[in-house]
Image: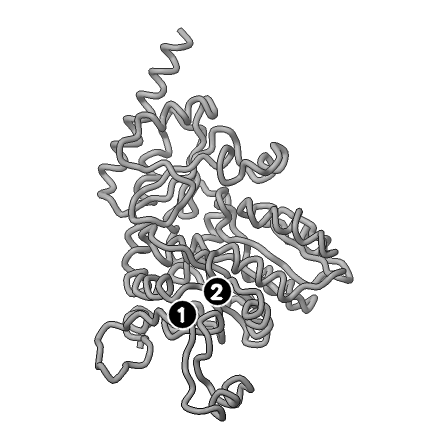
Amino acid sequence: MKKQTKAIRIQAERSQNREHSVPLYLTSSFTFEDAEQGRAIFADEMEGNIYSRYMNPNVDEFVDKMCMLENTEAGIAFATGMAANFAAMAALLKSGDHVVASKALFGSCIQILSKILPKWGITTTFVDGHDLSAWEAAIQENTKFLFCESPSNPGLDLIDLEAICQLKAKHNLILAVDNCFATPIIQTPADWGADLVIHSATKYIDGQGRVLGGVVCGREELVKEIRFFSRHTGPSMSPFNAWVLSKSLETIHLRMEKHSENALKLAHALENNSALNFVKYPFLASHPQFELAKKQMKMGGAILTFDVKGGFEMVNEMSKHITIASISPNLGDTRTIITHPASTTHSKLTAEQRAEVGITDGLVRVAVGLEAVEDLIEDFEQALEKATIALATLVG
């Protein structure tokens, strides 16, 4: 049975009411038939629900679908994507451990690695993700964990998953890959050998900007440690959000195909626009890692970036003339969203840190939605043209 079918047909066990659509299990706890059953479930001698901070039928259904899509043994869901990232690190690292991570990460991930984990004696070396020799050179005797995004947020830099998995195996390390931008529809890092695959389910797993969520999928022995940490610290996903996300997975194949189709067409249309320094998209031949993208990704994904001549002033002017795309720090919606990373999602990084990963004052991240792509092309072209004229008039 194909994954597309499984994403639709996997569901929690049907109740005595014979429902077709899985109901919401909005309960904080569950009952036992007798004290012996309660004892056995708490002792892990018997499977069963205890408390929705531990497990819930809606959450379990969502996790089962995600593990199926990511080709992993086990998983655990979280209230947000950042809770998933933090729990994976906090559960598996201890004081004195060392992490090697790509420089090209979401801003909050950098803050965890550079500001929060050092409080507990966990250090990180950041490297250029595309340079395998830099990864290897950064590995120390106390290195335990490798962390990367591919494609990265927002620079769309790629990690050679085959090569980084060979490196982690050589040094017996744990590799965690944030697969948020690609989704399991476009790539499955576990197939290359990644130990953990992490998502902000808030993005394309939901796909409609409705709920928050995160998930970690991976090897059973590692997920067991993360589950222990999470059960006792409480970053659990709500049953309602899990219900929404599980429903969303029924359409993720269709959505990602259309997102990717629209993004590629928009990237081609804007590639030679005179108001832009460049357009970057994994499946554009001009992307510096185009061949790698074709090797490990089925499609280019929904995200493209472009760099506007004139920096933030031009970006701001353009944003005043955009009529379709929303201006928001989020992504993954059916509706196209533009973001200025330097002043929002990555504003807490230093100017030097932003420069190292290509986040300029003119960089715009576009999460391409499901609107008619002809409308999107027309909207971006007219906004850029009007912004150019407005600034030229101001200067003149």
Image marks 1 and 2: residues in contact by CB distance under 8 Å: yes
Residue 379 occupies quadrant: top left
Please state the horizontal and vertical placement of residue 129, each as a whole percent of the image: 60, 50
Q: Let me know if residue 18 appears in the view.
A: yes
Q: 102 or 199, which lies in front?
A: 199
Seen at 55% across and 73% down, the residue is: 219
Compare marks 1 and 2 and give the one earlier in the sequence.
Answer: 1
Where 331 sits versus 393, above or below? below
- Within 10 Å of disc 1 (Cα), the crowding (few <14, some 14-19, many 20+) is many
Left or right: 289, with 58 as reference point: right
Seen at 28% across and 73% down, the residue is: 22
Q: How far apart are marks 1 and 2 (CA)?
A: 9 Å
Residue that badge 1 annotates: 59
Q: Which mark is residue 180?
A: none
Residue 212 occupies quadrant: bottom left
- Within 10 Å of disc 2 (Cα), the crowding (few <14, some 14-19, many 20+) is many
Q: 275 or 92, which lies in front?
A: 92
Seen at 41% across and 90% down, the residue is: 33
Tell me the kind of residue under disc 2. Answer: Ser
Seen at 35% across and 69% down, the residue is: 26
Disc 2 element: loop
Left or right: 172, with 381 as reference point: right
Tell me the kind of residue under disc 1. Answer: Val
Q: The N terminus appears in which quarter of the rendering? A: bottom left
Q: Let me know if residue 130 appears in the view.
A: no
Q: The C terminus appears in which quarter of the rendering? A: top left
Colour basis:
one colour
Residue that badge 2 annotates: 236
